[in-house]
Image (tube, grey):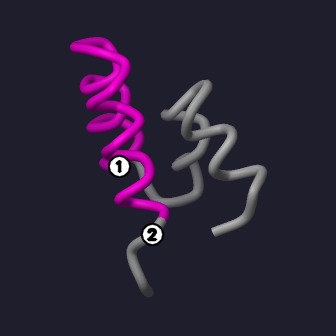
Amino acid sequence: MSLLRVLLAIFFPPLAVVDKGCGSVLIVFLLTLAGWVPGVIAALVILNKQK
């Protein structure tokens, strides 16, 4: 997880998970609409997940 990805996850969570797949982007986008904090947490969890 790079510093750029972490900053993107904090400021615009859906953009940070674009390369993780459409489902991840949709989930993070919906959580960001529901509230900024859930979107950031979901993006960080998805980015921190090992392949």
**Disc ID at residue 24:** 1
Quadrant location of residue 16? top right
Residue 44 is one of the magenta-drawn residues? yes
Residue at 58 percent of width and 57 percent of height: 19
Q: What element carries label 1?
A: helix
Which residue occupies the foreground of this view, 35 or 23?
35
**Disc ID at residue 6:** none
Neighbor class of circle 1 (other Cα within 10 Å; few <14, some 14-19, many 20+) is: some
Label total for image: 2
Q: Are marks 2 and 1 in contact (CB under 8 Å)?
A: no
Tell us which disc is closer to us: 2 or 1. 2
Residue 48 is one of the magenta-drawn residues? no
Residue farthest bottom in this picture: 51
**Disc ID at residue 48:** 2
Residue at 31 percent of width and 12 percent of height: 33
Q: Position of residue 44 (x, y in %)?
A: 44, 53
Distance from the alpha carbon under mark 2 to that under mark 1: 13 Å
Q: What element carries label 2?
A: helix
Above or below — where is 19 with respect to 35? Answer: below
Which amino acid does the dot numbered 1 rest on? Ser
**Horizontal side of residue 29 vs 9, given as left or right:** left
Which residue occupies the foreground of this view, 29 or 5?
5
Give the mark, 2 or 1, whose residue is nearer the N terminus.
1
Neighbor class of circle 2 (other Cα within 10 Å; few <14, some 14-19, many 20+) is: few
Q: Where is residue 34 in the image (x, y as percent from the top left)?
A: 22, 14
Quadrant location of residue 51? bottom left
- Magenta region, main secondary structure: helix
Q: Where is residue 29 in the image (x, y as percent from the top left)?
A: 37, 26
Residue range in magenta is: 23-47
**Horizontal side of residue 26 vs 5, given as left or right:** left
**Horizontal side of residue 4 vs 9, given as left or right:** right
